[in-house]
Image (cartoon, rainbow, N blue to C red):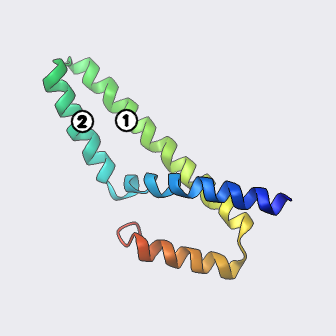
Amino acid sequence: MNKKIMIMALAVLLPFTAMAVGNETGHHQSQHGEKIKQLTKELSLSTDQKSRLETIFQQHREKLKALREENHKLIEGVLTNEQMAKYNALRKERHPKRQ
């Protein structure tokens, strides 16, 4: 029963892990910079507001990174060493920029 629950949790968490990966490549960081520029222009943000938004986006990136690390540890607890090696190879294959 526990194994089924872990597999189901893994199936639910994997898409979120994949979506969050862009943070490590800096892709999301540049997107956040563009978003701040756009908001500054469209909303006439003050320097203080712009700075606060940058802080919010940075905290968001840090939370996503921590979540990815936590998910990876959970996955390691479910898969065998052989499966984990294959899993890591699949991740590298799908997202070569990540590694």
Left or right position of 84 against 96:
right
The residue carrying mark 2 is 35
Image vertical order of residue 61 relative to residue 56, above or below: below
Image-quadrant location for residue 71: bottom right
Left or right position of 28 against 34:
right
Which residue lies at the image location 73% right of the left edge and 66% below the top edge? 78
Residue type beneath disc 2: Lys
Label 2 Cα neighbours within 10 Å, binned few <14 / some 14-19 / many ≥20: some
Across and down, in percent, residue 61 comes to: 43, 43
Q: Nearer the viewer, residue 39 or 62?
A: 39
Q: Nearer the viewer, mark 2 or mark 1?
A: 2
Which residue lies at the image location 61% right of the left edge and 60% below the top edge? 72
The residue carrying mark 1 is 57
Left or right position of 31 against 95:
left
Image vertical order of residue 41 relative to residue 83, above or below: above
Q: Quadrant of the C terminus?
A: bottom left
Across and down, in percent, residue 6 comes to: 74, 58
Across and down, in percent, residue 86 comes to: 58, 80
Verify CB contact (< 8 Å) between mark 2 and mark 1: yes
Q: Nearer the viewer, residue 77 or 52?
A: 77
Q: How many marks?
A: 2
